[in-house]
């Protein structure tokens, strides 16, 4: 038996655990630099085909770099400023790693590249390569080189890749600062819960082991596939959280076994057999919830699956092997000082009894509160991320605040159209039709520039391509649709769809930044039903294997959905609609980028099922011991609710510290997860769980006879 093996070799296991942690720390130290930077892009999509075509056949692409040039005196048309602008354009175009560059001065003084007041102009550039090449290799040298002030102009660097480079840098700083806050807070809360410092230190140690172990595992994963840098952040968040969760459960059970009069070795063995099994089930549900992210074809989201499974694996090993060994060495020093009240005299026992006596009153009130808090989610609007994920103090954010305020069009966010079967004559009516779309400022093509359906200028330099492409019998064409800033802010996705819907006399595909983000968003949202179904199915099977019941998994699914609705309602209320944005220090954009809510859904669903497993395990133990379907509920809750409450409070505090970050994604993660955990541990597990179990009675543990036989064969029982 594992428990007795651990008790007999506790010193050796602790020594090996420390050695493994140190080794994992050395291996994991190189993980951060080995992780990849990702863009919001959908492999194989129409917009990605356009990106490849532009790079291969036109030696250009959507501008991912920008220089904002501000005249120190006069305007951008003054001789000194024009000379400086032309010089900067040439310098940027020849900078190593930059594929092409153009500007207000090199494009015949196009008005879309000049601010309304004439004091600012843009230089745009395309840097080929993936996110790692641009953000890690190019921008760290390019940005400081071109951030300058001369007698004539001041220059600031922006562009989509610079925005997300600064986002990653800020997010890393925010995570590290949050971790520095989390560790002492968690240690303090654990001391308050345990009333002993030694078990508090050991529990924090398990959390650190989970973090180091998961980073070391990710280092191995990186050898086979791309893993996003955000995976390391998830490892930090969840490592401490799950390590503490599982550590609390094991320590509470060990104390209970000691109070039952068992010797320390026996208490360790019984703890591993009882609590260890529950931790395995809990870890399985969390890992299963996060592993469904593998259905997405996007490295960014798949990375969270790798990180989640790695964290669970490390946390489970720490809690079921290392922690029991440490408890064997600590022995009775783990026990709480002072008398321990009887279970039936505690708050949770009496609260559960009170709720079960009036199930409709308490259940109805809790349900009404949950539905009210979750109602804002009915108005959710998924949108595209931009520089406003950064704080107003970030240089890239400041640049784009000026662009939004001063420029009628954001040319870097143009929609790029390519076709391989067109002539200038056939392009003209198509370009005119595109220019009549609401929110289109201008369409540039080889047939000329069009505004409002009418030709406004001759052919634009850099847009047409008159040389033959790979097929010498065809002539390639490229069109650029310039949207207004207002339409981009209001409905960029809708504009992309309208552009793609305009009939064309030839084959045409749409790309550019708005189209890439639209294809990514569509790829994410199209998988949502599958993700939800997989999570429910996998956790349903795991709970059936644990309980042998069909009702328990159904009830758990219902409660989890109610719990998560509150989290999503808060996301819409706060981050989409902008309530409390001043207090929290961010700029609402009227929509939510879908990746973060999906990640939060998977994490929160797993953690909610985590607490469900803790509670059900103890209730099922009491039911198996007494055979009383109703009396076992308050007894099981009374034995596990203090643990669940303590774990939820500590985990909520851990997540809440990320709300102090400067990046909007982290604020969403921190606030949403903290709220979901607190609601789950109170209204869900403290009220609705006993209500539903009271109403179901003996049916809580019901399953059809064939499934009962199946459970006896494959169920995970003692």
Image: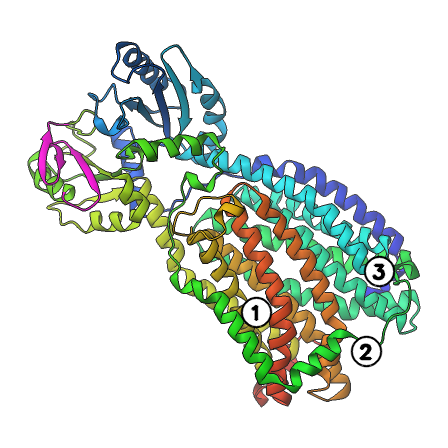
Dot 2: few (<14), some (14–19), or many (≥20) neighbours within 10 Å? few
Label located before the other in sequence (3 or 1): 3
In the image, residue 457 sits, relative to residue 22, either above or below, namely: above
Tell me: 59 left or right of 226: left
Secondary structure under tag 1 reads helix
Near-viewer residue (587 or 700): 587
Near-viewer residue (644 or 278): 644
Tell me: 455 left or right of 110: left
Tell me: 214 left or right of 158: right
Q: Which one is in front in this view, the residue at disc 3 or the one at disc 1?
A: 1
Give me the C-alpha separation between circle 1 and circle 2.
Answer: 34 Å
Give me the C-alpha separation between circle 2 and circle 3.
Answer: 34 Å
Give me the C-alpha separation between circle 3 and circle 1.
Answer: 30 Å
Tell me: 583 left or right of 712: left
- Residue 102's mark? none
Classify the position of the N terminus by image quarter.
bottom right
Residue 142, percent across and down?
45, 22
Magenta range: 436-459
**Could you tell me if the residues under marks 1 and 2 are in contact, i.e. CB atoms within 8 Å?**
no
Classify the position of the C terminus by image quarter.
bottom right
Residue at the disc numbered 1: 539
Residue found at x 54% / y 52%: 669
- Residue 6's mark? 3
Label located before the other in sequence (2 or 3): 3
The quarter holding residue 688 reads bottom right
Secondary structure under tag 3 reads helix
Residue found at x 87% / y 51%: 12
Residue at the disc numbered 2: 345
């Amino acid at each position: 038996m594992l428990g007795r093996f651990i008790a007999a070799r506790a010193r050796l296991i602790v020594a090996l655990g420390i050695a493994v942690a140190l080794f994992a720390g050395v291996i994991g130290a190189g993980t951060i630099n080995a992780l990849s930077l990702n863009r919001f892009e959908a492999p194989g999509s129409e917009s990605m085909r356009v990106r490849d075509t532009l790079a291969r056949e036109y030696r250009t692409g959507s501008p991912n770099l920008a220089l904002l040039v501000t005249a120190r005196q006069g305007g951008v048309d003054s001789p000194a400023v024009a000379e400086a602008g032309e010089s900067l354009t040439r310098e940027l175009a020849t900078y190593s790693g930059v594929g092409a560059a153009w500007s207000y001065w090199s494009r015949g003084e196009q008005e879309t590249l000049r601010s309304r007041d004439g004091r600012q102009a843009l230089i745009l550039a395309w840097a080929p390569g993936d996110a790692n090449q641009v953000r890690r290799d190019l921008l760290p040298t390019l940005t400081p080189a071109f951030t300058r002030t001369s007698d004539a102009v001041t220059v600031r660097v922006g562009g989509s890749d610079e925005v997300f480079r600064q986002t990653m840098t800020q997010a890393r700083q925010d995570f590290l600062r949050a971790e520095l806050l989390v560790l002492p807070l968690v240690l303090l809360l654990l001391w308050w819960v345990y009333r002993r410092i030694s078990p508090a230190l050991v529990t924090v140690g398990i959390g650190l082991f989970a973090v180091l172990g998961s980073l070391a595992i990710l280092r191995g994963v990186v050898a086979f596939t791309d893993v996003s840098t955000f995976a390391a952040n998830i490892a930090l968040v969840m490592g401490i959280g799950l390590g503490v969760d599982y550590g609390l459960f094991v320590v509470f059970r060990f104390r209970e076994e000691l109070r039952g009069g068992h010797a320390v070795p026996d208490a360790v063995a019984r703890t591993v057999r009882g609590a260890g099994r529950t931790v395995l089930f809990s870890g399985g549900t969390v890992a299963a919830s996060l592993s469904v992210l593998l259905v997405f074809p996007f490295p960014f989201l798949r990375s969270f699956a790798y990180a989640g499974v790695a964290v669970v694996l490390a946390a489970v090993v720490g809690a079921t092997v290392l922690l029991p060994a440490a408890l064997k060495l600590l022995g009775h020093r783990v026990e709480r000082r002072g008398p321990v009240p009887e279970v039936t005299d505690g708050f949770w026992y009496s609260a559960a009894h009170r709720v079960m006596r009036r199930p409709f009153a308490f259940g109805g009130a809790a349900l009404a509160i949950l539905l009210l808090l979750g109602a804002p989610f009915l108005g959710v609007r998924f949108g595209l991320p931009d520089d406003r994920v950064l704080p107003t103090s970030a240089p890239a954010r400041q640049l784009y605040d000026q662009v939004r305020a001063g420029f009628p069009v954001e040319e870097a966010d143009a929609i790029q159209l390519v076709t391989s079967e067109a002539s200038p004559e056939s392009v003209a009516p198509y370009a005119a039709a595109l220019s009549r779309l609401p929110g289109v400022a201008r369409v540039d093509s080889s047939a000329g520039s069009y505004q409002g359906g009418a030709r406004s200028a001759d052919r634009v330099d850099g847009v047409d391509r008159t040389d033959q492409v790979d097929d010498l019998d065809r002539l390639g064409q490229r069109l650029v649709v310039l949207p207004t800033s207002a339409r981009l802010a209001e409905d960029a996705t809708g504009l992309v769809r309208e552009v793609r819907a305009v009939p064309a006399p030839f084959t045409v595909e749409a790309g550019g930044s708005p189209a890439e983000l639209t294809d990514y968003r569509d790829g994410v949202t199209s998988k949502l039903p599958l993700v939800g179904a997989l999570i429910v199915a996998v956790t349903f099977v795991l709970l059936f294997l644990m309980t042998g019941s069909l009702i328990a998994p159904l009830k758990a699914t219902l409660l989890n959905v109610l719990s998560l609705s509150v989290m999503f309602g808060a996301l819409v209320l706060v981050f989409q609609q902008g309530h409390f944005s001043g207090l929290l220090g961010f700029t609402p954009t009227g929509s939510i980028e879908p990746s973060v809510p999906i990640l939060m859904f998977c994490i929160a669903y797993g953690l909610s099922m985590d607490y469900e497993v803790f509670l059900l395990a103890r209730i099922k133990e009491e039911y198996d011991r007494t055979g009383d379907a109703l009396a076992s509920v308050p007894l099981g809750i009374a034995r596990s609710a203090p643990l669940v409450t303590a774990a939820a409070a500590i985990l909520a505090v851990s997540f809440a510290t990320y709300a102090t970050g400067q990046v909007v994604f982290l604020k969403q993660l921190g606030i949403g997860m903290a709220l979901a955990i607190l609601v789950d541990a109170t209204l869900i597990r403290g009220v609705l769980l006993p209500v539903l179990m009271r109403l179901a009675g003996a049916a809580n543990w019901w399953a059809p006879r064939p499934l009962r036989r199946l459970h006896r064969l494959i169920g995970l029982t003692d």
